[in-house]
Amino acid sequence: FCCKNESRVLCCKMRSPITALVALLRLTASSTFTCDNGKELPSSFVADDYCDCLDGSDEPLTGACGSKQFTCTNKPHVSTSIFASRVNDGVCDCCDGSDEWAQPALCNNTCVDLAKEAFGSFERACLRKAALSIEGQQTVESDAKRLAEARRLIAPAQPQLDALKQKKMDVEAIEREQRSLRATRLAGGEVERVLRLADFNKQMIMQSFARLALSRGVDGVDKLHETLSEHKDLKDIMEDIDSADLIEVAMEARDSKAEDDSAGSGTCAAHEPCGFEAALLELLVGFDTVEESVLREVLTGVLKAPGGPVDAAQAAAGVKGSSPSKMWHTMAQISRELLGGIGVLLDDAQVAAALELLEPFRWEEADQARKEYNDFLEQFKDATQTIELLEPIEKIVDQFGERSEWRHLRSKCLSREETISSKPGSSSVKFNYQVCPFSKITQNGINLGTFVDWTPLPAGSIEALMRDGREPHAYSMRFGGGDECDGLPRNTTLLFECGEKDEVMEVTEPSVCQYEGWVRTPSACNFLVLKQRYSELLEMAARAGIPYHPSPQVQALWAEQ
């Protein structure tokens, strides 16, 4: 606020020390007082225990404007803020007693003791930073030596290794093209087209249901009943068909095959239904009124169920854990039998080529090129692993600090769990963060960004953070290019402050998909701040008659700086 009289203007912030307010009140009675929002008052209205200014700037010490903040200087400890309503309330909130200025004898100054305790933690953190610097420098030197030795060992073989690698890459490019071509042919329905499934009439489709189901035994018939019952156009018909009756036919077919394989498998060799197939079809009553397009849709669904062409396409693309289904080979035989009954013959060569698409894809030339490259690489396994491990570190070695004090965080990930409840009474949500400096940050597996660089904090932001009780390092880490969010990549800013150990203090989301994290680490400690704090503490301790001296280790540390 500012106080004006005819000859001078005295200005100070609302949260300034008490001496500023005393100087203000010594102005002449004719002086005026200007609120922070520009409103002018008689100076007699200041500190009269009545809130005249909407911003509370006329009552910074009386507590009349209770929602305003009062700052405790707390030298040589850390400054804190309290509501102005707690000023002169008979309770000592500030360790220096400045909130009870009306009763100077009420509060003992405990700031020195608190500062000594905090200084001890800061002192240990700085000593840990010194140790980390030594360790970091040793690690950087060791990394450089290991990398140089690995490169020396592999250098004579590098031309041949590069040639084999290039050959492998060229052949794998052809392999990818062939795999893509096969997948395209499968997705385009080549198998269905070659087997001429579009030529099936309603009776052929029903026979296909029965033969496919019986070829898979009791489970196949049970699955057929389930598939038909779940279809929206067939479920009413299936309500009158008992699955137990269908399964009984399947069990009889199974037992007949077990007793005498020559008695038949339960399907017909000719195009007419007979045996167990006919028995099964007799139970499937009511389908004569169903549109042929509906039955064709169901048959396609059966073939594309797990174990059908979807799995086959995955196998053709080389997806592990998938295999083509025998159902397709059975379907090929069914198609030969049923279409043969009406004089339509399948092209055996085309059928063989189509069914081959369902087999796991192998490109022998690519397999051989990979084997040659890997066999040669095996001779230099240790050297290549060292190069793969240390070359990425070599590229960012200048990011580890002047004395390599940040090197230890390159291979370290820190965890933090945040539990957030959006509304009272609603279930909470847990977020598990993995913070890996110089690498990436994740939230429940979602990438919030990979390390980009160090960025100096904007002008004024350090002071603002310090007013909020933070003591940030001068540089923050920038992480970008994370997983997409609302069409944009997630990004994170990681700030650091001094602490005895490496730990994530918090991770927040100040704006949508833009994150901010705080990490406490010895690497962020500042030796000059340590020395400055010691000087302040020594002076205050002397005033309070409290003996205090830094540890020999800290004195030795200062001598090295």
Image (tube, rainbow, N blue to C red):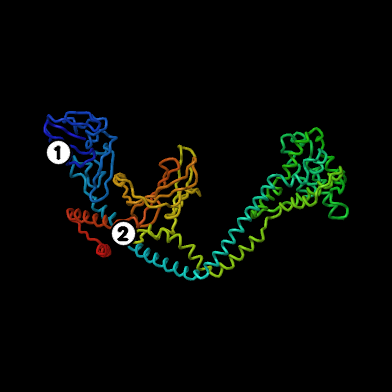
Position of residue 273 in the picture relative to residue 125 (left or right): right
The residues bearing labels 2 and 1 have C-alpha atoms spaced at a distance of: 41 Å
Label 1 secondary element? helix
Mark 2 or 1, nearer chain start: 1
List the residue tagged with mark 1: 23
* Res 359 quadrant in image: bottom right
- Image coordinates of residue 440 in percent, x first then y, are 45, 52
For the N terminus, the image quarter is top left
> Which amino acid type is marked by label 2?
Cys
Residue sitting at x 86%, y 49%: 269
Q: Nearer the viewer, residue 159 or 55?
A: 159
Label 2 secondary element? helix
Residue neighbourhood size for the residue with mark 2, other residues' Cα within 10 Å, grouped as few (<14), some (14–19), many (≥20): many
List the residue tagged with mark 2: 126
Mark 2–mark 1 CB contact (< 8 Å): no
Position of residue 37 in the picture relative to residue 354 (left or right): left
> How many numbered discs, if any?
2
Q: Nearer the viewer, residue 491 or 496?
A: 491
Residue sitting at x 17%, y 41%: 19
Residue neighbourhood size for the residue with mark 1, other residues' Cα within 10 Å, grouped as few (<14), some (14–19), many (≥20): few
For the C terminus, the image quarter is bottom left
- Could you say which disc has been placed on residue 287 in the image? none
Q: Is residue 544 above or below residue 142?
A: above
Q: Is residue 1 above or below residue 320?
A: above
- Image coordinates of residue 329 in percent, x first then y, are 77, 51
Position of residue 528 in the picture relative to residue 263 (left or right): left
- Image coordinates of residue 560 in percent, x first then y, are 26, 64
> Which amino acid type is marked by label 1?
Ala
